[in-house]
Amino acid sequence: MSALDDIQVQVAQTDRPSPDHGNALPILSEIRHAVARLAETGEATCIDLAAIPFGPGDEDRLMQLLGRGEVEATVQALGPTRIWETRFPGVWVLDYANGEDQRVALQIEVDEVPRILRTQQADLGDCLAALDAGLEAAAGTASSPAPTTGASES
């Protein structure tokens, strides 16, 4: 018989696992500092939640603390990106997925509007060209004579 056999071991069992591993509150504190920076200097912040070692329950706890606000959007680009404002104005959750709807990134963005929803500068030139073409076509249609049926009146 070994000495290890003499050691009494008790297994403690809980009714439910711990709701989180304590990472939600430090992230909430980081968000608080990012909001202060945005208010004071206008500097936006992006927090990559995939880079943070979440334990089981941490993400759920953070999302519970952040809650949901009034604004939601979905962007379809290489897969759906779901965006929602939390109950804290200027604090956004961006949940990126691929074409198979599998998560590829999860971020918190602290800004007035998430960058993904802003028009890209390069797209504005294309927009102007399309508007010019549309205006030209509409103006040409409005000044064209009415089509004739080919029948003459007697």
Image: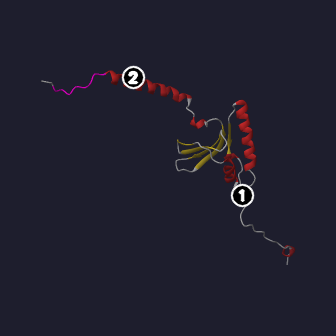
Q: Give, as a three-letter code, the residue at label 1.
A: Pro
106 displayed left or right of 131:
right
Residue 37 image offset from top left, x and y in percent? 73, 34
| Residue at 35 percent of width and 22 percent of height | 140
Q: Is residue 28 magenta?
A: no
The structure residue drawn at horizontal position 52% and vertical position 30%, both measured from the top left corner, is 123
For disc 2, the marked residue is 136
- Quadrant housing the C terminus: top left
Q: Does the residue at mark 2 contact the one at mark 1 (Cβ under 8 Å)? A: no
Tell me if 46 is positioned left or right of 147 in this view.
right
Q: Which comes before the other along the chain, label 2 or label 1?
A: 1
Three-letter amino acid code of the residue under disc 2? Glu
Q: Which mark is residue 19?
A: 1
Height in image: 10 above or below 118?
below
Most foreground residue, 17 or 96: 17
From the viewer's side, name the closer residue of 104 and 141.
141
Residue range (magenta): 144-151
Residue 153, picture quadrant = top left
